[in-house]
Image (cartoon, rainbow, N blue to C red):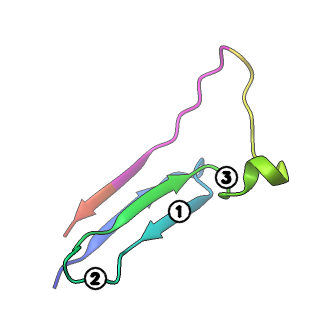
Amino acid sequence: NYSVAFNLDANYSVVQIYHPNNEQKPYICIEPMTALANALNTGNYNTIAPDTIFNAVFSIEYC
């Protein structure tokens, strides 16, 4: 058995996870996101001012 620890800071509000249902494709995709996938259409996202730095941190640990 394997396990993965996934850590992200408060600047990430959403995580998208994909795993194909196929034994020939033994992988998983993990995408931390700062807004929902439809955010550009709904307007539900944050912006920053020009010349501003935005930091967000995540880590993936294989156990």
Q: Are marks 3 and 1 in contact (CB under 8 Å)?
A: no
Q: Is residue 54 magenta?
A: yes
Sequence-wise, the earlier of marks 2 and 3 is: 2
User: Tag 2: Cα neighbours inside 10 Å, few (<14), some, or many (≥20)?
Assistant: few
Give the image quarter of residue 3. bottom left
Residue at 59% x, 30% y: name it. 54
Tag 2's secondary structure?
A: loop
Q: Is residue 20 above or below residue 36?
A: below
Q: Are marks 2 and 3 in contact (CB under 8 Å)?
A: no
Write down the region rendered in magenta. Answer: 51-59
Residue type, label 3: Ala
Give the image quarter of residue 63. bottom left
Residue type, label 2: Asn
C-alpha gap between disc 3 and disc 1: 9 Å
Residue at 52% x, 51% y: name it. 9
Sequence-wise, the earlier of marks 1 and 2 is: 1
Q: Which residue is mark 1?
A: 15
Tag 1's secondary structure?
A: strand
Q: Residue furthest left?
A: 1
Q: Which residue is mark 3?
A: 35
Residue type, label 1: Val
Q: Is residue 61 above or below residue 51?
A: below
Query: Where residue 41 sits in the image (x, y, percent)?
Result: 80, 51
User: Tag 1: Cα neighbours inside 10 Å, few (<14), some, or many (≥20)?
Assistant: some
Q: Residue 32, labelled with which disc?
A: none
Q: Which residue is mark 2?
A: 22
C-alpha gap between disc 1 and disc 2: 22 Å
Residue at 28% x, 70% y: name it. 4
